[in-house]
Image (spheres, coloured by chain):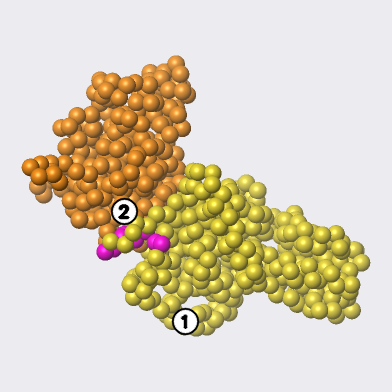
Amino acid sequence: MSNKKIAFMKGNEALAEAALRAGMTGYFGYPITPQSEVIEYLSREVPNHPKCVVLQAESEVAAGNMLYGAGGAGARVMTTTSSPGYSLMQEAVSYIACAEIPAVFVNVQRGGPGLGTIQPSQGDYFQAVKGGGHGDYRLIVLAPNSVQEMVDHTVMAFDLADKWCNPVLILSDGAIGQMMEKIELPEPYEFRSAEDMRADKPWATNGKNGGRKKNLLTSLNIKSDEMERKNNELQAKYAKIVDSEVRYEAYHTDDAEIIISAYGLSSRICKKAVDLGREQGIKVGLLRPITLWPFPSKKISELAAKPSVKMFMTIEMSVGQMVEDIQLVVNGRKPVYFYGRTGGILATAEEILDQIKKKM
Amino acid sequence: MKEGYELVYKRPGTLLDTRMHYCPGCFHSTLHKIIMEVVEEMGIADEIIGVSPVGCSVFAYDYMDIDFQQAAHGRACAVATGIKRTLPDKFVFTYQGDGDLAAIGTAETLHACNRGEKFSIFFVNNAIYGMTGGQMAPTTLEGQKTTTSPYGRDPKHVGYPLKMAEMISQLPGVAYCERVTLDTPANVRKAKKSVRKCFEIQKQKLGTTFLEVVSNCPSGWKLAPVKTLDFVKDNMLQYYPLGVKKDVTAQQN
C-alpha cells in the first residue's frame, strides 16, 4: 500500500503493514487460521520493500528457528501464528530467550486445547507469560485490544526486542485479527547505513568483517557455574524490565468498589460493562494490563490495599488463567472472582454485569 | 622457525589452537581442519558464518575462529536459512551429524535443499549417536549393534538406513551433492577439494551444496581407531558408496 496515514484495515493486515513500516527485515511464517492474512499481505507487499525478506517456512518449528538465525545475524525479525502453531515454536522461543536475540512473535489466539477451534480465545495466557518452552526465561508480552493497538504494539515490539535483546510476544486473538477498524499508521522506518546498523548490534553473527573478534550465539552453557551465571544474568535483565516496562490502562478505578480485570478483546467488553454499571449507580472500574509480562502487580496491589475496593472480578475468554496472577497479587486481601466463556463465545457487557451483581 | 628447517605443514590460522573434546581417532577433527583450511585459502574467514548442531560437533564453534550460531537439534538448516536469506552475500554453512540432519531435522534439511538455499551443508554420517552414548541413528547399518539396537538393527522393526546423499541429489534446488570419506590421506585430500567446490558453488549462488562425509566413531562402535578404518571401508562404504551424486557445474566444466 502507499504511504497513507489513515486506513480502514483488518487487524492482521494492519499488523503486517505496521511491521513493514517498523523496519522489519525478516519475516518467516507458516499459514494458520485465523492469522494467514499476515503472510498473505506481506507476500503481496514485499516487492515494495526490498530490504525485507518474506519466506513461507515448512513448519512453525522451522519458522521459529529461521527467526533465531536471521535475528542472530542482525535482522529485525517477526513471525506470526495462532495457538497450535505457537506451541510448535516454543523450542525456538526458549533458545532465542537464552541466546538473547531480538525477535517478535505474534500469537493470534484461537480456541484450544488441541486442534480446538478457529474462533477467538484467550486460552494461551499461561503459555505466553509463564514460559511455554523449557527453562527459566521470560518474554515481554503485549496484549492489544484494537486494530490500532495491533499497529502500535507491533512498532513497540520491535523496539522493545532490540532494546532488551529479548523475544517479545504480541498476544492477540482471532477477533482482533479479523475485525476491521479505522487506524492511523506510523511513518515508515528510516533505515540507517549498513555500518550504523552493524554498530547497533555488535554481537550479531554477520561475519567478522575486517577482523573483529568472532561472535558466537549459543544457548549452550554446559558447565554448572556457567549455566547458573547465565540464569542470574537473565534474571537481572528481567528485573530491570519489570521496573521499567509495565503498561496498563486504568478506567474509572479511582473511586471503584469493584475492579474488573481483563486484557485484550475482553477488556473492550468490560469497558462497556463499566459504563453500564456506572449508569446503574454501581461503582465499577477496569484495570487492563497492556503488558501481561511484566504484569502490573504494583498497581493491582495498590488497588487491593484500598479500603474502598470491595472485590475483584476477572473476565477472560478462557476457563481462568490471568485470574491466578490477580489472586497472587491480591493475596487474599479481597475476594477475587472469575467469569469466562470459551469456544469463541464472548460474554456480553450485560452478562458480565450480572455476574458482578451476583457477587455483590 | 629454526634455521635450516623448512615449514611444510601448519595448523590453519582459522582453526583455534585449543584442545578438542573429540575422541582419539575421530574424523571430526580432520573435517574441521580441512574446512578451516579451505576458508583460510579462499580468504573468507571474515565473511562466513557457521551453524553447529546438537551432537558431538555442538562445540565446533570452540575450534573454528569464525562467527557461529549454535542451533537446536535438527534445526541447523532452518537457522542457516534465516542467516543466508538476510545476508545473501555472506558464506554460510551447517555442520551436522546423522541424528541431527537425518532424523530430527529431516524436514528442515529436505526443505532447505528443496528451496535451493544457497549455503553449504556438511553432513557427518558415522551411523551412530556419538554424543548421547552410542544409540542407533537413522543411518545405522542393517545388523549393526548399538545401545538401542543391542541385537543388531532390524529393518523390519526400525526401518532401513537412510541414504541421504542419494535422496538430496534428487532435489532440483541442489547444485552439488557428493559423498566423501576421510579414511586415507588420499581421501582426505579429495574431501578437501569437495569442501572447496561447495564454497565455490555457494559463491556463484547456484543452489544448495551438500557434502556427506562418511565418518567413524571409535567410542560408539567400540573399535580401536585403526580398526574403524576397516569398518568404514568394509561396511560403511559398501552401503554408502562414495562419489558425486549431482553437480550442476559438470557441463560447464
Residue at the image point whose x is 54% and y is 81% from the top = A184
Mark 1 nearby-residue class (10 Å; few <14, some 14–19, many ≥20) = few
Q: Residue furthest left?
A: B4
What residue type is disc 1 on?
A: Glu
> How packed is label 2: few (under 14 Cα within 10 Å), some, or many (20 or more)?
many
Q: Which residue is tagged 1? A: A187
Please give the chain letter of the residue carrying mark 1: A
**B188 relative to A244, above or below:** above
Colour of the chain lettered B: orange
Query: Residue reaching furthest top?
Result: B151
Identify the chain drawn in yellow: A
Q: Position of residue A225 (x, y in %)?
A: 54, 47
Q: Is residue A208 magenta?
A: yes
Element type at mark 2: loop
Residue A251 drawn in magenta: no
Q: Is residue A171 left or right of residue B45?
A: right
- From which residue to which does the magenta span run? A203-210
Tag in front: 2 or 1? 2
Residue B153 quadrant: top left
Provide residue B12's location: percent of width, then percent of height.
22, 47
Q: Is residue B195 visible?
A: no
Which residue matches tag 2?
B66
Furthest-bottom residue in view?
Answer: A5
